[in-house]
Image (tube, rainbow, N blue to C red):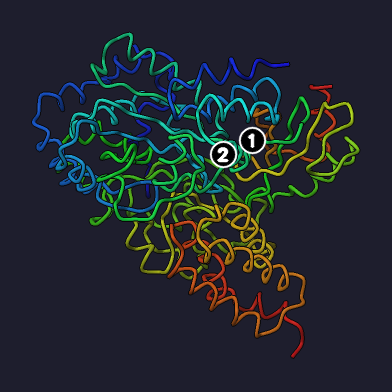
Amino acid sequence: MLDYKGIMTDYASRKEGIIEAYHAVQKELNYLPKEAIKAAAEAFKIPEKEAYGVATFYSYFSVQPRGKYIIRICESAPCHIAGADEVVEALEQELGIKMGDTTPDLKFTLEFAQCVGQCQETPVITVNGKPYGGVTKDMVPRILAEYK
Amino acid sequence: MAQEMHIVLKNRDKINPLDINDYLAAGGYQSLVKARGMAQEEVIEEVKNSGLRGRGGAGFNTGLKWSFSYNIKSDEKYVICNADEGEPGTYKDRIIFESDPHIVLEGMAICGHAIGSKKGYIYCRGEYPQVVDLLKKAISQAKEKGVLGDFDIEVRMGAGAYVCGEESALIESILGQRGEPRFKPPFPPVSGLNWKPSIVNNVETFANIPAIIHKGAQWFTGIGAKSYPGTKLLSLTGDVKNRVCIEVPTDTTIRDVIFHFGGGMRNNGQFKAVQIGGTSGGFIPESLLDTPIDFDSMRKIGATLGTGAVFVMDQSRDIVDVVTRISKFFEHESCGKCNPCREGVFRCHEIMKKINKGLATEEDLEKIQLLCLVMEQTCLCGCGQAAPSPILTTLKHFQEEYEQKLLPA
């Protein structure tokens, strides 16, 4: 198990460090387990509900387990008109899961995202933050193969 | 013919953004040295007289904003760079950082001198982890060289929340809280981070400062539109041939942006509409394309310059479908603090879906318009106030597309 207490203590010297501490936990686990939120509440001396409130406010934090690779598909208007729906379909088909779900082997999670700021080449997906632009349904297997 | 003009992007592709020596060789940090040799009031006057207005979308006079913080006696003040570029279709701040991060650091340090602050923060969106790394490198190089003097800059990374682009929400997020906007007044220049005077400016705004100090206010006022001088970065996307980031004088027309710099329509399509300023911007029809892009000209036609995102759509695009998607965005991004936005964006999306599916009546159109007007007047922050804009402007300019989808009377 990850040393949540240690991570939280590292950031708790500054009372505003909780978001960075969450980023640090997610870098290892891709989600924020209950224990991490509890440790944050203790280290930052705030009620647990507040620590939970911060964790659930931001789209990039998750309190549910997610896969090793988080694939985000931008669903904002520029990607929408460029055919993001087709890419969603291809990803769902290729991985055998629906948007929002994680593969049983905990390898991939599919999430919708809002604009990721790569609109020079739409539609855009990101894999653990790495952007791929101008994605077509035919490109999906090749991109996934990089992570299989 | 219209030409690009590079003030903010003057070093683009000319220097290595990861090497401070390149920036120094190009005259970098000379403006900071010059500013530090000037009285604080002089720096603020220069920026005020340049007419530089906030490039994040609100268009407030930058020097005037600085003067609010300067005029308050406080043991601590903060300079905050808003790099939470979340308006869909916008990628200009990323381009600035990827081309020339030090120009922004220099602008922030000049602001620090002007208002009397020793501490700066850059709040960068969680979608740009590569930019965060780049900024940390740039800051450590600047510290090593000692160019920032006693002005310190730290980077904070967001975690995916559109509303954090609103300055008081951004401050809450830096503090490690839920990024919900504050009730105003007081405004951040008076009482912001830790309730101390705080200047929150957009990346592009700070990036304009070194040149203004170097060349003077008068030089700057001579560029572009009179009431919104200088250049503007625009990020082109959608059905336009060249999807690029450009920097043009603010008197450039929308038509030139799309058909000259953008190279016209992709796949020989016919122009239908352009949405400028991000997803909260208004839709603009062909008949208004000769409008200059400056803040006030755009406002006059019921649109916005906003962040400078230029989202072009051709005749094959279904406006109602696009607006339905936009209303989904706002439903997702509303922070939920105020009722008009939380409930309003939800109902807007609900009605837009109904219209898009062909199940709506004239009455639904009336309802959504009324709802939009209420939201514009009553929402707490810019997010909810601007969310209705795509709906209202398309109802105005593309009403027939809505009518076509209504149930037969």
Which is closer to the viewer, label 2 or label 1?
2
| Amino acid type at image mark 2 | Val
Closer to us: B384 or B299: B384
Q: Which residue is mark 1?
A: A61
Mark found first going from the N terminus, 2 or 1? 2
| Amino acid type at image mark 1 | Phe
Q: At 47% from the left edge and 50% from the top edge, which residue is drawn?
A: B260
Q: Position of residue B288 (x, y in %)?
A: 45, 68
Q: Quadrant of residue B135?
A: top left
Q: Is residue B223 left or right of residue B92?
A: left
Q: If the image is split into quadrants, where does the N terminus of chain A sit?
A: top right
Residue A24 position (above or below residue B257): above
Closer to us: B70 or B406: B70
Q: Position of residue B29 (x, y in %)?
A: 25, 21
Q: Is residue B274 left or right of residue B305?
A: right
Whether the residues at callouts 2 and 1 have beta carbons within 8 Å, the answer is yes
For the residues tagged 2 and 1, is the chain the same?
yes
Q: Chain of mark 1?
A: A
Q: Find numbered disc 2 in the image and state the secondary structure of the residue it sits on.
A: helix
Q: Which residue is mark 2?
A: A54
Q: Position of residue B393 (x, y in %)?
A: 52, 70
Q: At 32% from the left edge and 62% from the top edge, which residue is drawn?
A: B296
In the displayed image of the protein, which residue is found farthest to the top?
Answer: B144
